[in-house]
Image (cartoon, grey):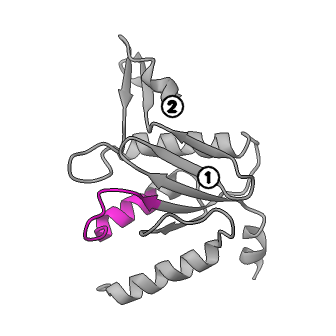
Amino acid sequence: MIKRFINSFGTTMYVQIWEKRIKVTNIETGKIYDEAPLVAIETVNKDKKAVNAVGNKAALLMGKNIEVINPFSHPRVLFSDFHVAEKLLQHIFKLLTGGKIFILAPAVVIHPMEKTEGGLTLIEERAFRELALGAGARDVVIYQGSPLPIHGFNYEAIKAMDKESTINRGSSF
């Protein structure tokens, strides 16, 4: 009961992922981040690396000490670099929440938009779930299907659909 009350004040992020695009919508504010899923990583010294830029700005920075990585580019699956993807989502969440110092962690719907033929494996689902949690989410739903409408977006209904599909798919434990 208390958890539900506290969560009602948090925001909801709808994350759509393609290999060459990431679109994140803050459901409450309507703010949208829609750019290439790129992260420019600068090598400060041999032991330290830092995120220099993300998105379309990152594509412009490739140079001597800067490597540009797309964490969602792989020939077989829609996930290639967990750590870089987590940094990318952290940055996007911060942008869409206005960079406030104190915010409640968002509820997140992760929606892989391609490379899902035959459905996601349990390993892929877990990787996407842990990606969102590591980026600061308080709760995560992995959604597969047609794009969700932003108007009338109902996180609890999407979460209930996710639980039902998990039950129907059957789990060993």
Q: Is residue 140 above or below residue 165?
A: above
Disc 2/disc 1 C-alpha distance (Å): 17 Å
155 left or right of 117 in image: right
* Label 2: few (<14), some (14–19) or many (≥20) C-alpha neighbours in 10 Å: many
Residue 109 showing in the rendered view: yes
Disc 2 marks which amino acid? Val
Image quadrant where residue 73 sits: top left
Q: Which contiguous range is marked in magenta?
A: 111-130
* Label 1: few (<14), some (14–19) or many (≥20) C-alpha neighbours in 10 Å: many
Residue that lies at the very extreme toward the top in this rendered image: 64
Specify which label sits upstream in the sequence, 2 or 1. 1
Residue 58: percent from left, percent from top: 47, 25
Residue bearing mark 2: 54
Residue depth check, mark 2 versus mark 1: number of the one nearer the observer: 1
Q: Which mark is residue 25?
A: 1
Q: Residue at x 72, y 57 (%)?
A: 104
